[in-house]
Amino acid sequence: MEEKIGIVTRGINNIYTVVEKELFMNNREFPSYMCRIKGKVLNQKRDEYSPLSVGDYVLFTIHTKEEGLITERLERINTFQRWNAKRSINQTIVANMDLIIIVTSTDEPPFRPRFIDRAIVCAGNTPVLIVLNKCDLPLTQEEDERFTLFKKLGFDTINMSAFDAQGIELLKRKIEDKIVAFVGQSGVGKSTIVNELLDGSSVQQIGDISLKFNRGKHTTNHSIMFKNKNITIVDTPGVREILIPHTDLNLIGESFPEFKKSLGKCSFDMCLHESEPDCDIKRRVENGEIDPDRYESYLRMLDSIRGRETLYESDRR
Ligand SMILES: Nc1nc2c(ncn2[C@@H]2O[C@H](COP(=O)(O)OP(=O)(O)OP(=O)(O)O)[C@@H](O)[C@H]2O)c(=O)[nH]1
Ligand SMILES: [Mg+2]
Ligand SMILES: [Zn+2]
């Protein structure tokens, strides 16, 4: 049977919605297939919460007008991963994105810069855009400075309101012809923005789910990919907390652009910039070059990884 390349647009209870990549990418009519994973092939990826995520490229075979079978997961270009504390395992929220859009709000829920710091780490090497939504609500000067810092550090940022067409237009221009995912705390306005970007009703439905179920005040409960012409968006469920994935402690600093200048300047080769003597990062925090709150955020990430025991590690014993 002929294997085709597909994209996973949704996954619930081990049933994945898959569309043909060729049709999807070329803006043609794309039927969706409900697919299971063939045999145990993919189940061997045990170091992760689930073998497939939205955005994954797969090989699959088509069996009926609505059903298919996934035979292989193709290599991932990048992932947005978080630590699933309940299951003690890394969970890939989306894979192969051109851009991760980290959404925060000025208020309701309150502005939380350290959430952004962690989400940047979760995005790994995926490019990120940081959106401050609900700018119709006030922000304190201190909060405003902490947000502006991201821009100074070289991140792309937007201040906007989902209810203001100007911000939506700006955002639209940044995501055209890309596959992007919206991530962020619950209630910051991800689905509201996604609805605006997709122009509501003209959206081609994927699977049996229409945008209606993922919109407005209804809390999103699973990731799903939507497409309308040259806008392709994954809306993800909001989380109360985001924990960085389990990873080598030395890799975390790589998500802090302000650390780059110190490369090779600490006296320890594998310096984690905590209490090691003659540390260039600590020196730069003390002389005000590195923001103390970003540094504190970094230290907390190191601590959060320590003391974790992953399921797959304890399995091996
Ligand atoms: N004041 C204000 N409220 C907004 C704005 N954008 C969205 N909201 C409101 O914020 C609430 C939550 O919006 P959602 O879009 O459901 O938030 P979400 O991020 O998708 O939430 P989850 O699906 O739980 O992750 C809704 O009542 C929206 O109307 C904004 O720019 N300003
Ligand atoms: Mg939502
Ligand atoms: Zn150091």
Image: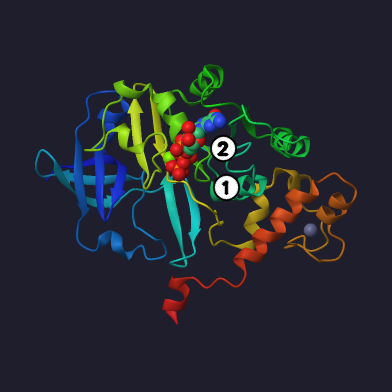
Question: Which numbered disc covers residue 46?
Answer: none
Q: Position of residue 77 (x, y in %)?
A: 45, 44
User: Residue type at mark 1?
Assistant: Ala
Front in this rendered view, residue 255 or 297: 297
Q: Is residue 144 in view from this perspective?
A: yes
Q: Which residue is mark 2?
A: 128
Label 2: element kind: strand
Q: Position of residue 272 (x, y in %)?
A: 73, 62
Residue at screen point 25% across, 28% down? 23
User: Residue type at mark 2?
Assistant: Val
Q: Which residue is mark 1?
A: 119
Residue at screen point 36% across, 45% down? 54
What quarter of the picture does the C terminus occupy? bottom left
Front in this rendered view, residue 81 or 236: 236
Q: Is residue 90 left or right of residue 4?
A: right
Which of discs 1 and 2 lies nearer the camera? The answer is 1
Label 1 close to label 2 by CB (< 8 Å): yes
